[in-house]
Amino acid sequence: MHIATQSLPTPFASIKKPAIGSQGMVVTNHPLASAAGTEIMLAGGNAIDAAIASLFALTVVEPMMIGVLGGGIQHIRLSGGKHHIIDSLGTAPLTAHPNMYECLSDELDTMRETRGRENLLGVRAGAVPGSLAGWCDALARFGTMSLEDVVSPAIRYAERGFIVTPYLNSCIGDCVADLAGDSGLADLFIPNGSPMKAGERLVQREYAESLKLIARLGPAALYTGPLGDALTSFMRAEGGYISQKDLDTYRVIDRAPVRGSYRGYDVVGPPPPSSAGVHITQMLNILEGYDLRGMGFGSADCIHLLAEVLKIAFADRSMSTADPDFVDVPVERLISKDYAAERRAAIDMNSAQSWEAKVFANESVNTTHITVADAMGNVVSTTQTINGLFGACVRIPGTGMILNNYMYNFDPHEGRALSIAPGKRVFTSMAPMMVLKDDHMAFALGLPGALRIFPSAMQAIVNIIDHGMSIQDAVEAPRVWTNGGALELEPAFPDEIANELQSRGHRIARSARIAGGMNAIGFNPDGSLTGAACWRADGTPVAISGGLAAAGVTFNI
């Protein structure tokens, strides 16, 4: 196993620096969340303990992205080598039905628009939450510390407050009008009518009390206890759908990972209802027939090929992102090498093609991701969200909890694969990925970014394996994206490359940022860990080295 420590020449300069440690690594999209996980690991916890501590901390310091009323996917590799996929995605309430919203459009890019934006904002946009159940499940099965211990940093941040970053200030500013519609959120984030400024201290005392309840009661605090009572009472009063029966019947699901191979590496990711495992494997299978290293990172040939495989993946994606309990998903066919060969044979290197993609382009970009590893060999890669920026922009009175707007991920039209059905899980592009060489961890990564998540994760994998990039360069490298429409390019790609791609038939669109803040951990041949986070978010790697005194050491005066 070998991960490059120096990158090949690239047309960009990484902004952040990696961290290197020997005893553990925590990488999240906020420095205080990374600190929380590190604190727990230094106290003797393993990677799972640290990951759950970081997730709870993120609910405080990244409240626009993640919350106990959200959902997500955890990819855990235990020290013995077994992979676990914990699906705690949200589900449609049991009283939900295909015609619960009035649709305003049949057009692909506006097909989720509904009367009054009811599937996007307000109590009717909320799906049954799964995050808290999933986090507590992982901790109980694979952690070593108590829930009280791992929640304690989050309680401290909520009770004492933390300093608002420019990133959080920007997110509040983007949502001022919607936040103003909820008195609790308005008081918290836009006091005196203005968004909290970077450098000010944000205190969340109500939410601190809710976290204390969770620390004491566990998931029962929400699913059968006082936090659930507050949620369902508010739903009844305001016309929402979530009931006590929904909370009673919610279940975390263990899923078998999707496994693929690429140039001697094993690639492991989540299965449907996530797109990542299936379609990253599919795209890599197609790319395996080309000399990407010879083409060079950022060349017109390489970007053209990436664009074509992205369009192919999105053309097939509509079959493989729905809840597998409701839709028969042809996973084995999509990830087969034979199918990749069929698709590869139709690619024209000189001309962009239409692959008749039929995708749903409105999935939320407002998600977060963490990657954690310990010295024992446990690794966690997990992506979590409340879906939209500040979810449904509804705060459950007296609790500080922010409601998700997961119902927006469903197609509000009847009779389609992604139509609403009682108890159905939302689909997702979450890509908590792990890559192995000779049965040993090579690297783990993930990021937020809606439909751009799994394509960006695929590009990072290619950056490392084909282009020999370091972990830091791989997460920060400029990205491309298309789902069959315009080919989006980040600014670092020069105009001459854009012009060449345009001459091949691509419609070029410049994008300041494609997807969100990727973070990753590389597992080096000498046993050390390299943590990296990119410029697109507040990502911060924190490394642990050193350790306890050698056995038998005494100090004599």
Image (cartoon, rainbow, N blue to C red):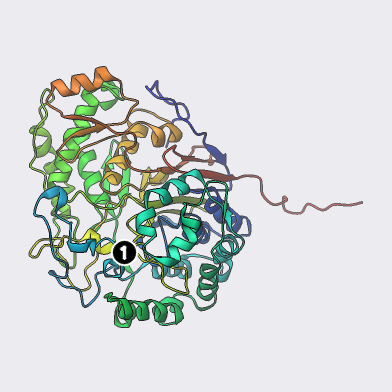
Q: Quadrant of the N terminus?
A: top left
Identify which residue, 249 or 420, lies in the foreground.
420
Q: Is residue 344 left or right of residue 74?
A: left
337 w.r.t. 322: above or below = above
Residue that carries the numbered disc 1 in the rendered image:
89
Q: Residue at x 30, y 22 (%)?
A: 296
Identify which residue, 497 or 125, lies in the foreground.
125
Amino acid type indicated by mark 1: Leu
The mark total stands at 1
Q: Residue at x 47, y 60 (%)?
A: 59
In this view, which residue lies farthest toward the right?
557
Using the rendered image of the protein, determine whether residue 515 is visible from the camera's viewpoint: yes
Q: Is residue 44 left or right of residue 69?
A: right
Using the rendered image of the protein, determine whether residue 359 is visible from the camera's viewpoint: no
Q: Residue at x 58, y 60 (%)?
A: 157
Circle 1 packing at 10 Å, graded few (<14), some (14-19), many (20+), is: many
* Helix, strand or loop for disc 1: loop
Identify which residue, 246 or 256, lies in the foreground.
246
Identify which residue, 326 or 337, lies in the foreground.
326
373 w.r.t. 206: above or below = above
411 w.r.t. 531: above or below = below
Residue 542 position, x and y percent, is: 56, 45
Residue 196 position, x and y percent, is: 50, 52
